[in-house]
Structure formats: C-alpha cells, structure tokens
Amino acid sequence: MAVLSSESGSDSVLSHGARHYLLLLLPSLIQDIERLGLRNVIAHASLDQHDVTSLYFEARSIARLLPERPEAVDSELWPDLVQCAQLLTLLVNETAREELARTRRQAINRFLPEARQQVRSAADHPGGSVDLRLAGLSRAGASAEDTCLEAIRLDRQRRFEGLRALTTDGLTRHQAAIVEGALHYVRDAMAQPPQATGALDLLISLCDLLRRLQGADSEPEPDAPPPRINTANVVMGLGNILYACELGLRRSAPQPGQRRDRTGGD
C-alpha cells in the first residue's frame, strides 16, 4: 500500500501563501533528510523502515515534478502534498529533536546578558527623562523573565520601524508571497498586539534579518548576517511560522490576519 494516500480535496482549503510555502517546503524537507542521512532518519523514525524508504523516494519523485505556479497543481493532488509534508516533517523532527533542544538552550543563554544590557541602556537614555519601570528592570534583582520581555519589546519596536525598507525585489514567486504574508501579519499585529507575542517577535526578527540580507547584497552593513544565513532559509522560517498549523505541521498558529490571503492570487 502506498505511503501517500488521502481523500480527494480542493486547493481552496489552503490559503494563497500556504500553497506557495508548501511548494517550497517539500524540496526543502527532502534536502533535510538527505543532510541528516536516510539511515539516520530510519533509526529515529516512529514509522517502519519500509514506510520511511517508500515515503522518501515517492516524495522525491513528486518534488521533482512540482510546477512553479500553484494554479498548475491538480486540485486533487493538494491533500497528498499536505500529507507528504506532514510525514516528512515528522521524520525530520524526530531525527533533529535533540539538536534543536540544544540549540534553543544555547540561544537563551547567549541572549540573557544582551537583554539586560539593552534594558539598562534604555533606562539610562529614555528620551531625556528617567523611566522608572525600565530602571527597575535594569537592576540586578529584576527577574530574568521580566528583563528579557522588556528587552524583546524594545527590540520589537526598533526592528518593526526598519521593515519599511524591506521589499520583495529579487525574490522568487513563492518567496515573495510568503514575505508579503509575513508583512501583512506583522502590520496587523503591531496595530493590536496579541497577548502571546512569540510568533510576532519571530516574524519581525526574520523580516529584519531578510532586510539586512538585502542590504548586504548591495552595500555590506557592519552587522550583516553571517554567510551561512541566506534568503532562502529566512523565507522558509517565515513560512513555517505563518502556515505550519494550516498544513497540519503543528497544533497552534498565529492569529492576526492568518486567513486574509485565502482567496489571493499571483
């Protein structure tokens, strides 16, 4: 029995941005499995060896035949593509989970000292007057959580102001659709910030990183991203935040404007 099977459906169940993201995601997941090594993936998989092998080769064949325009994809194929992405993501996550947890811990440990310094600087120079709330947060006795949250809020606003310079020039059709979706979400969320700002902060940071990458292509900046970070990786990160839940790749998703592009076109 084939690994990929689903009831027939229509591409209308997927938003405009999600369709573009899915067509970028499938080849990327194939590359992830090849990078991790098929034997390594099989060793960590909850599926049996035959299913993993069949899925990999079937998905690789499908990815090679995917058209550039979402409109060119047969409507009955979308459910199979979604299920394929779900299974491939499961395999990649099962193999890379330990590595991701270690990276997350390292990122938090690196960020906390920088966050405290950022809050101290804002407290010392709050536009000519003393901000007692920031001054309190900058003291050594302030909790790590409060200090980090305030530093993130300050960084969020600064990065958001810089996004006016972000364009979709030089991006592929799929990448441009994802970036436009991210900018719509960010503008909506900054106008009425959600209680949970995790997705918003990640989107703003990635959009800001993309802006700096664009600047580095024309005139290198002092804080230009390292060479290992590229436009394709950043755009895939944006797509994951915006559309992973819609594609069934995770349980929760951003809320502001997430359905606004459902009927959009190219």
Image (cartoon, rainbow, N blue to C red):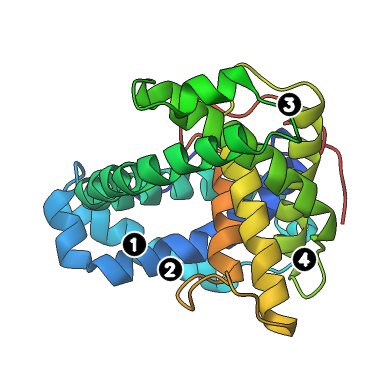
User: Relative to residue 83, is residue 97 drawn left or right?
Assistant: left
> Residue 173, labelled with which disc?
4
Mark-to-mark CA distance, 1 and 2: 6 Å
Are the two marked residues, 1 and 4, in contact with CB atoms closer than 8 angstroms?
no
The residue sitting at 51% across, 36% down in the picture is 120
Q: CA distance from mark 2 to mark 3?
A: 34 Å
Which of the two discs, 2 and 3, labels the residue nearer the N terminus? 2
For the point 50% across and 66% down, the residue is: 27
Marks 3/4: CA distance?
23 Å
Does the rendering let one see residue 32? yes
Q: Which of labels 3 and 4 is toward the front?
A: 3
Can you identify the residue that label 2 sits on?
Answer: 60
Q: Secondary structure at mark 3?
A: loop
Of the residues shown, which amino acid type is indicated by label 1?
Answer: Tyr
Relative to residue 93, is residue 198 drawn left or right? right
Instruction: Name the residue beneath numbered marker 1.
Output: 56
SS under mark 4: helix
Q: Residue 115, labelled with which disc?
A: none
Q: Residue at x 60, y 49 (%)?
A: 205
Q: Are marks 1 and 3 in contact (CB under 8 Å)?
A: no
What residue type is disc 3 on?
Pro
